[in-house]
Image (tube, grey):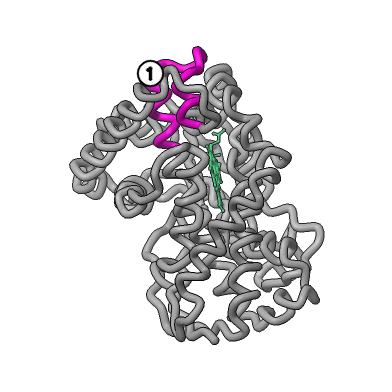
């Protein structure tokens, strides 16, 4: 598709698909021409606005609002700040490894790749991680669904989404009220005590953090185990013959956890030889851009030592993933812990997650020794 029709209109979904690296980069970088305001777009198409999980959050805002919504917290996610948190993430990883240390068979997803990021983000937020089953249920309802929903599909899930969104809003409202006078260092307190955000924006921010960082990081860790085993490089990564961080970058490129992002045109534009009117919905396929042979040598091959590796798995431009450093460090720690613990990690058959916007598997059972 990328070669035959790099920019293509899908009649059924009424969406323009953009596949090539250069064009996807342009869509993500030019925020004036390609707005992130997916809330209004969905409202116009499906009559669904306030129930959108990203209502009044940075991910669906354009400048200048975007700068205000991201600025108050950006420092907390800088690479330096996240490095300081490393020992704590290592301790969380060790705790989950301990639980399966004597097992012969584990599910990478359930036993490790899901609980690790959700526990870490819960700690950063300053909320009890015991409710992680509830967090997972909310994430599954609000995030783990195709982004190219048809009208019928959206209607069908609307009731569930409404309820999940409302539950999350109530949960965070209560927490934020309780921290209004707190002097703690957690993110809920930072959010509760800032003057930069309205009340609605505060609950939106907490919701976004809980949703944006979990399924994605779970998929990165799981996809890494999957790629290393499938490509026969697990031992090389374990011994350091292949650099672990470089190999993780290649997983991000080869099996990008987020496959596609949505934008809407604010004006008529020509891209990839196609003229697109104002107000059209664009799906920018970062998963496809990351396999563009114009940019990557042997793009279809997994090369764990690929360098340079200009993938755009964390997006590009002003919306570049706020949690990229955190996700990278979590994946690094998770893989080191798993490979140090188990000499054998042999994949069993597993079902693929039927999602278009996220790339991952529902389970990754492994025989371990
Ligand atoms: C934005 C991917 C982990 C929080 C994004 C975007 C991508 C992305 C592609 C751009 C969205 C857009 O342009 O519309 C990923 C991947 C992850 C990951 C692949 C894991 C492997 C995390 C984590 C957190 C997080 C751990 C938080 C703790 C965010 C936030 C935004 C964002 C808040 C919105 C930034 C903005 O709009 O300025 N992420 N993410 N992400 N991500 Fe991540």
Tell me if residue 125 can be seen.
yes
Q: Quadrant of the N terminus?
A: bottom right
Picture coordinates of residue 175 (x, y %)? 35, 29
The quadrant of the rendered image in which ligand 1 is seen is top right
Mark 1 = which residue?
Answer: 199
Picture coordinates of residue 33 (x, y %)? 57, 28
Instruction: Reply yes or no: does residue 282 show up in magenta.
Output: no
Kindly give the residue lying farthest to the top in the view shown: 195
Residue 26 sits in quarter: top right
Main SS class of the magenta portion in the image: helix
Picture coordinates of residue 276 (x, y %)? 51, 36
In the image shown, does 195 or 253 lie closer to the viewer? 195
SS category of the residue bearing label 1: helix
**The residue at label 1 has a CB less than 8 Å from ligand 1:** no
Q: Which residues are magenta?
A: 187-208
Number of residues whose C-alpha sits closer than 10 Å to that of mark 1, classed few (under 14), some (14–19) or many (20 or more): some
Q: Quadrant of the C terminus?
A: bottom right
Residue plotted at (61% across, 68% down): 337
171 shown above or below 357: above
Picture coordinates of residue 14 (x, y %)? 37, 44
Residue plotted at (48% across, 81% down): 102
Instruction: Reply yes or no: does residue 206 show up in magenta.
Output: yes
226 shown above or below 149: below
In the image shown, does 112 or 84 lie closer to the viewer? 84
In the image shown, does 165 or 76 lie closer to the viewer? 76
Residue plotted at (48% across, 65% down): 112
Residue plotted at (46% across, 51% down): 119
Tell me if residue 145 can be seen.
no
242 shown above or below 210: below
| Residue 184 shown left or right of residue 316 in the figure | left
């Amino acid at each position: 598709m990328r070669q035959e029709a790099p920019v293509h209109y899908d009649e059924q979904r009424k969406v323009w698909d953009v596949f090539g690296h250069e064009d996807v980069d342009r869509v993500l970088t030019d925020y004036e021409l390609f707005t992130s305001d997916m809330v209004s777009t969905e409202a116009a198409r499906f009559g669904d606005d306030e129930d959108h999980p990203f209502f009044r959050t940075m991910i669906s805002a354009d400048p200048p609002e975007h700068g205000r919504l991201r600025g108050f917290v950006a420092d907390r996610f800088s690479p330096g700040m996240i490095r300081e948190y490393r020992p704590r993430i290592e301790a969380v990883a060790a705790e989950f490894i301990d639980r399966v240390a004597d097992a012969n068979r584990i599910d990478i997803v359930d036993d490790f790749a899901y609980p690790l990021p959700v526990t870490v983000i819960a700690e950063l937020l300053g909320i009890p991680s015991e409710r992680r089953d509830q967090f997972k249920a909310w994430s599954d309802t609000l995030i783990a669904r195709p982004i190219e929903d048809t009208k019928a599909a959206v209607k069908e899930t609307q009731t569930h989404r409404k309820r999940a969104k409302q539950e999350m809003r109530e949960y965070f409202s209560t927490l934020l009220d309780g921290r209004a006078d707190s002097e703690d260092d957690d993110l809920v307190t930072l959010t509760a005590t800032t003057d930069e955000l309205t009340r609605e924006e505060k609950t939106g921010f907490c919701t976004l953090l809980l949703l944006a960082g979990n399924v994605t990081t779970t998929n990165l860790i799981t996809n890494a185990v999957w790629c290393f085993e499938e490509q026969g490089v697990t031992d090389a990564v374990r011994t350091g013959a292949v650099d672990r961080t470089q190999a993780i970058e290649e997983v991000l490129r080869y099996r990008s956890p987020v496959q596609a992002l949505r934008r809407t045109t604010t004006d008529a534009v020509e891209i990839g030889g196609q003229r697109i009117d104002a107000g059209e919905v664009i799906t920018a396929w970062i998963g496809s851009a990351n396999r563009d042979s114009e940019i990557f040598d042997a793009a279809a091959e997994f090369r764990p030592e690929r360098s340079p590796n200009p993938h755009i798995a964390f997006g590009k431009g002003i919306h570049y993933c706020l949690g990229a450093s955190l996700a990278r460090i979590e994946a690094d720690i998770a893989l080191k812990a798993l490979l140090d613990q188990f000499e054998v990690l042999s994949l069993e058959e597993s079902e693929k997650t039927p999602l278009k916007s996220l790339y991952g598997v529902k389970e990754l059972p492994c025989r371990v020794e």
